[in-house]
Image: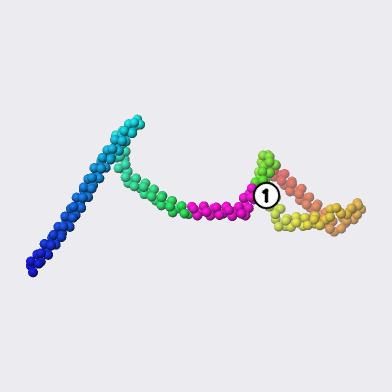
Amino acid sequence: MDKDNMQEQINEINRKLDIVLEEVMAQRETRQSIEDLTTDLTIVGKDVFKSTVTELDNAGVEIDGEAVKQLMLKLVRNVDTLNEMFEMMESANDLVKDVTPILHQMGLDGIHMMNEFEQKGYFEFMKESMKIFDNIVTHFSVDDVKLLADNVVTILETVKNLTQPDMLKAINSGLIVYKSIEIENVEEYSIWKAMKAMNSKEMKKGIGFMITFLQNIAKETDKLNANSN
């Protein structure tokens, strides 16, 4: 029983020794591969260095060894900064990848919108509207524009008053009456007939309206003249 146990222990030791030997051989092969690679890289590096020196010499470029040394030291000192810069570049690259589909979709939406505007005639409308501005520019002088700028407040106030509901109703009523009159078949009035017509209630009211209107116009004109002085 003791012999069997001893034999098992010996077998276990042998198995472990085989594993250790395999690991040693693997490390030796790895070290040999690294040495061979180092040798090859050294040869290649020397050839590249010689070729670079030759090319620089042919080009008339002189390398300051001290400057190269300082550059290498700066690179070593700023390794963290370089890493941050590369990380930022990677982040920017990821951002571009994320944003590209969105920009592509926005471009497609913009194209569809422009096509829709064209189908509805927006561009044609704008093109024809430019003729309005051309006519304004060619018709009015610079002095006219200056006068417009000086009086734009008064003009807007006038437009505002004209667009009030009661004023629009009055203007509309006047237009309706004007349209209802047959200009070519207006009845002729003699002085006597006119004086007789002026005696009617409607004419008296009309004359009263005109007199009141003219009086108020005169008062408003006096106020404007007083303010301007």
**Kind of residue at disc 1:** Leu
Rendered location of residue 212, percent (x, y): 79, 53
- Magenta stretch mostly in which secondary structure? helix
Q: Could you say which quadrant of the image residue 164 lies in?
A: bottom right
Q: Is mark 1 on a helix, strand or loop?
A: helix
User: In the rendered image, is residue 195 in sight?
Assistant: no
User: In the rendered image, is residue 138 in sight?
Assistant: yes
Rendered location of residue 125, percent (x, y): 64, 50
Rendered location of residue 210, percent (x, y): 80, 52
Judge by depth and name the residue closer to the eye, 40 or 59.
Answer: 40
In the image: residue 210, left or right of residue 37: right
Compared to residue 191, the image places residue 64 above or below, namely: above
Rendered location of residue 96, percent (x, y): 43, 51
In the image: residue 204, left or right of residue 70: right
Name the residue furthest left. 2
Neighbor class of circle 1 (other Cα within 10 Å; few <14, some 14-19, many 20+) is few
Name the residue furthest bottom. 1
State the quadrant of the N terminus. bottom left
In the image: residue 13, left or right of residue 227: left
Judge by depth and name the residue closer to the eye, 7 or 56.
Answer: 7
Q: Residue at x 41, y 50 (%)?
A: 93
For disc 1, the marked residue is 156
State the quadrant of the C terminus. top right
Q: Residue at x 67, y 39 (%)?
A: 142
Asked if the magenta segment contains residue 205, the reply would be: no
Q: Which residue is drawn at 32% across and 45% down?
A: 79
Judge by depth and name the residue closer to the eye, 46 or 210.
Answer: 46
The range drawn in magenta is 103-128
